[in-house]
Amino acid sequence: MSIQWFPGHMAKTRRLLLEQLKWVDVVLELADARIPVSSRNPMLNNLLGNKARLLLLNKADLADSNWTSKWLKHLKELSPVYAVSATTGVGVKQIVPELERMVLAKQAKQAEKGIRPQMIKVMIVGIPNIGKSSLINQLTGGAQAKVGNKPGVTRGNQWVRIHERVELLDTPGMLWPKFDDVEVGKKLAALGAIKDDVFDIEELSNWIIDWLNLHSPNSLSRYKIEESEVTLESLGRKRGCLIHGGRVDTLKAAQIFLRDLRMGQLGPITMDHLDK
Ligand SMILES: Nc1nc2c(ncn2[C@@H]2O[C@H](COP(=O)(O)OP(=O)(O)OP(=O)(O)O)[C@@H](O)[C@H]2O)c(=O)[nH]1
Ligand SMILES: [Mg+2]
């Protein structure tokens, strides 16, 4: 199964990002701590040019912290990076000081020309449902940006002041036209970045169950299905997803399984692993 999702509004978002980029000092890129590679948009390298970039691994509360430490060490060789949680607030306090550090050189140059320090303009970018709006709300301590547990909640661009000297532009989630590696599409779908109606959720759930059996069997043991292996069939039976004749409603079972995985009910999970 190959999954793709690049609807017209994402092509529009790509144009909006380009238009707004000239106003922006730093791009705040949100990736998912559970898939720190698969959740990064490869188009950004071209789109952003050499604009300063701060990378955040969000949803760190749902990721395996051992892997997160390894990823941070690896990624910080390329750009500043922090692990955060937009919902619990962990790590979020480091963001504004880091943004200020990143514009110091630029502001020093402006000061030489007699220009007073300007507002720091930051554009937040990332895949759908990654927590861009939640982070803005966490930074402002309010409910400035609309949040929702499905991809595609934010439409259009909105600037929000998050600090006396920092203004942030929320943007709609954006993916890219083709996932070169089919696993990337599956992982993005698994963790909720792709609308559920563009793929077969039973087929995807079976793939994830196989993946977990191989890489993280403890996650599945939380279902306490002892007499047989975990399948949509056994899981559905355990959860009482039955249809007439005592058959298992495997679609319902897949929905429950995906919800459990995404909400962290199977414990912390990281699905991108470093080779070394
Ligand atoms: N556990 C956990 N959940 C999070 C975190 N950040 C966001 N969420 C949840 O993820 C879902 C999506 O959050 P949003 O802030 O709407 O995501 P978004 O990136 O703005 O999404 P779009 O506007 O659709 O692109 C919501 O249910 C949030 O509560 C986090 O750090 N940890
Ligand atoms: Mg949003």
Image: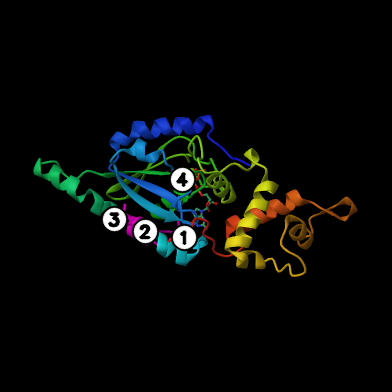
Using the image as rendered, state which of residue 228 and residue 56 is in the foreground.
228
Q: Which residue lies most toward the front here?
A: 276
Q: In the picture provided, is 178 more to the left or to the right than 241?
A: left
Hey, what amino acid is under mark 2?
His
Q: Quadrant of the N terminus?
A: top right
Task: Check mark 1 vs ligand 1: CB closer than 8 Å? yes or no.
Answer: yes
Residue 214, compared with residue 250, is above or below; it is below
Specify the label residue 74 is tagged with: 2
Residue tagged 1: 60
Residue tagged 4: 145
Label 3, label 1: how far apart the Cα atoms are: 18 Å
Hey, what amino acid is under mark 3?
Glu
Residue tagged 3: 98
- Can residue 91 be found in the magenta stretch? yes
Q: Earlier in the sequence, mark 2 or mark 3?
A: 2
Q: In the picture provided, is 181 more to the left or to the right than 251?
A: left
Label 1, label 2: how far apart the Cα atoms are: 16 Å
Which structural element holds mark 4? loop
Task: Check mark 4 vs ligand 2: CB closer than 8 Å? yes or no.
Answer: yes
Q: Position of residue 265 (x, y in %)?
A: 61, 62
